[in-house]
Image (cartoon, grey):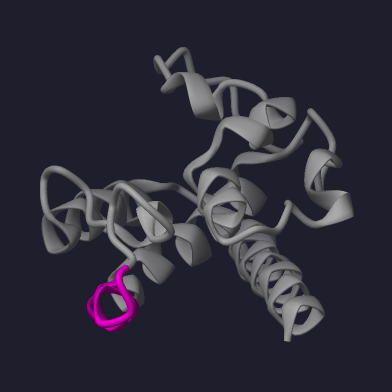
Amino acid sequence: MSTRCTTTRSWPPCCRTWNSAAATPIAADLSDLGTVLPADAATPPFDAQLDLATALGWLYVSEGSKLGAAVLYKLAGKIGLDEHHGARHLAGHPDGRARHWRDFTSVLDTAVLDAAGEARVIDGARAAFLRMHGHVEACA
């Protein structure tokens, strides 16, 4: 039996439902740049019964990308983009990128997973990376 992600955590409004993708920083940035979200952005890449291990894999990619975003954010600034226009999704976490990453990895490290769960974390991370890579390739 797999563990399901049933947290009672209070998520920010933009993260409470997948269908609120239009309210995300990425959607606002794309609008600033005169484009729209990819057609499949309103379709969740997984079902509502996402198991915890797979969710951790998706989060690993999402949270890890925020570290690399620091370099991209600096480059975006050179062309006039910032946390208010065009580069919201690249802006750092209010607590700081490194601290936010350490907090995430400390939670990840406490997850009790068997070999199958660890494999689902890896599969979730691969799926997240491939989805994002597909979006980037579609825009190129």
Image x and y of residue 137, in percent: 76, 84
Q: Is residue 83 left or right of residue 117?
A: left
- 96 lies above or below 134: above
Image x and y of residue 124, in percent: 68, 62
Image x and y of residue 107, in percent: 30, 46
Q: Is residue 26 left or right of residue 68?
A: right
x 73%, y 76%: residue = 130
Image x and y of residue 81, in percent: 33, 66
- Which segment is the magenta one? 70-80
Q: Nearer the viewer, residue 110 or 16?
A: 16
Residue 115 occupies quadrant: bottom right
Is the C terminus in the top left, top right, bottom left or bottom right quadrant?
A: bottom right
| Residue 82 visible in rendering | yes
x 38%, y 60%: residue = 87
Q: Nearer the viewer, residue 31 or 16?
A: 31
Q: Is residue 58 left or right of residue 99?
A: right
Does the magenta stretch mainly form a helix, a strand or a loop? Answer: helix
Q: Nearer the viewer, residue 56 or 77?
A: 77
- 134 lies above or below 102: below
Residue 46 occupies quadrant: top right
